[in-house]
Amino acid sequence: MSPTPTLSDVFAQYDALLNRYRDFWQLEAFAQTEWPWPQSAVEVNALIEPELNKLTNPVATPSAKLERESPFWLTNGIQGRKLAQINGFIAEFSKHASCHAAEDPIHQVIEWCAGKGHLGRILSVHQQIPVLSVEWQASLCEQGQALAFQHSVAQEFLHANVMHLPNNWLPSNTAIVALHACGDLHRQLLLQASSQGKRELFIAPCCYHLQQAEHYQPLSQQAQQSLLRLSRAQLKLAVQEQVTGGKRVAKLRDTEQLWRLVFDLYRAQITGIAAYRSLPSVPKHWFSGELSAFIHWACAQQALPVPADVAINALLPEAYERLALIRGIDSVRQLFRRPLELWLLLDRALFLQEQNYAVHLQQFCAHHESPRNTLIIAKRDAQAAYSET
Ligand SMILES: C[S@@+](CC[C@H](N)C(=O)[O-])C[C@H]1O[C@@H](n2cnc3c(N)ncnc32)[C@H](O)[C@@H]1O
């Protein structure tokens, strides 16, 4: 029997695949005006699929459900999918956290980027443990604190920017939970967690591309050796699959892509510059309005004269063709979405191992409840922490 691969072995598998096929996923689909590869989408699929099947999945699937019912007053106002995520998260927390260990237990939970602190509130009641919820938006802190008072929950809020907490701020004998903290926010937690002390981490990362740096800075030594260089736009691929939102959201996204293409065709025509030039993002409600209003706004962004409606409409057939091309390219890029997400998760896991944590990757809710459904569970005891000195 071959030995179970380590997280480092698994990282090496994903790193090799992503490097070998980078021409298939590191390009920007929107910027392409023709099919970029000698192979068709079906041929690329046939080439990659067997390779994907050989990769080890490092994420454990949930075993028997261990969810405790919450009284209705505790979960009031939390929408269905969020509640399913919280319940799954707490089920894993109660399996792994040592809040009630006879020796050297965890005696406080810190909720990182808490929002209204729904996770922290329910966790505090289920585990009978005090929770400190850290959140940047004052109004969310106030609402969360009011809910905690109302139900006599041992939960306090700290109104703070996690990016500006002092180094070594995290106390020892603490469990830190982070549900869907974006790029730099969970990265900051990882860096804070490398300071000494007994800690247990439960981190469900999301939106890896929401970071200040233009390029990804790998955390672990192994990822630092990788040949992959990831721009912010490339990082976005890791979360570019939406199961939430339904048909209305999908339709708005289609309209948005089509209108952006119409504008890009007009821009190329009038400036004579073929290279794609991106526009800032705008709220989705724009795309249930009028195409001409969007074009007016886009022209103002790039200081271009506004075309007549008839000229805009004449570009629609070509924009539809480009949209079909982009869909085809995206279907190939999507093959690499999960490998890229796992590469990023494994970078975090390896970094924590380097900081003397024992690390485990665990799925905590179904994919339709959230596609960002992997929990990094990392535990370090006091001895391991002090052995660093
Ligand atoms: C995606 S939400 C997740 C909220 C909650 N954990 C949940 O799962 O519903 C991210 C939260 O991080 C907060 N946040 C953003 N930047 C922050 C910062 N620099 N410091 C603290 N909180 C921050 C936001 O206000 C928001 O409430």
Image (spheres, helix red, strand yellow):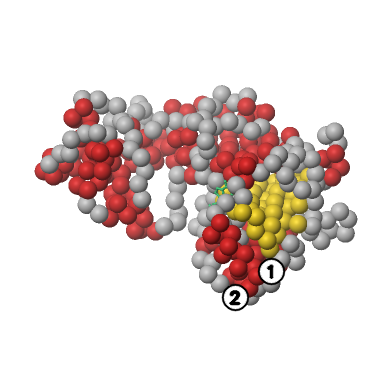
Badge 1 element = loop
Q: Calculate the distance from the C-alpha at mark 2 to the C-alpha at mark 1.
A: 14 Å
Using the image, determine if residue 318 lies above or below residue 251: above
- Residue 373 spot, x, y in % from top left: 57, 52
Quadrant the C terminus occupies:
top right
* 309 and 337: which is toward the camera: 309
* Earlier sequence position, callout 2 versus callout 1: 2
Rendered image: mark on residue 72: 2
* 365 and 146: which is toward the camera: 146
Q: Label 2: few (<14), some or many (≥20) within 10 Å?
A: few
Q: Is residue 384 in sight in this rendering?
A: yes
Of the residues shown, which amino acid type is indicated by label 1?
Answer: Val
Pair 2/1: label in front = 1
User: Circle 1 is placed at which residue position?
Assistant: 153
Q: Is residue 204 in sight in this rendering?
A: no
Which residue ends up furthest to the right in the rendered image?
A: 103
Using the image, determine if residue 335 lies above or below residue 15: below
**Residue 40 occupies which quadrant of the picture?**
top left
The residue at the point 55 percent across, 46 percent down is 182
Which residue ends up furthest to the bottom in the rendered image?
A: 72
- Residue 335 spot, x, y in % from top left: 46, 39
Badge 2 element = helix
**Residue 114 occupies which quadrant of the picture?**
bottom right
The residue at the point 19 percent across, 47 percent down is 292
* 312 and 282: which is toward the camera: 282
- Residue 212 spot, x, y in % from top left: 52, 36
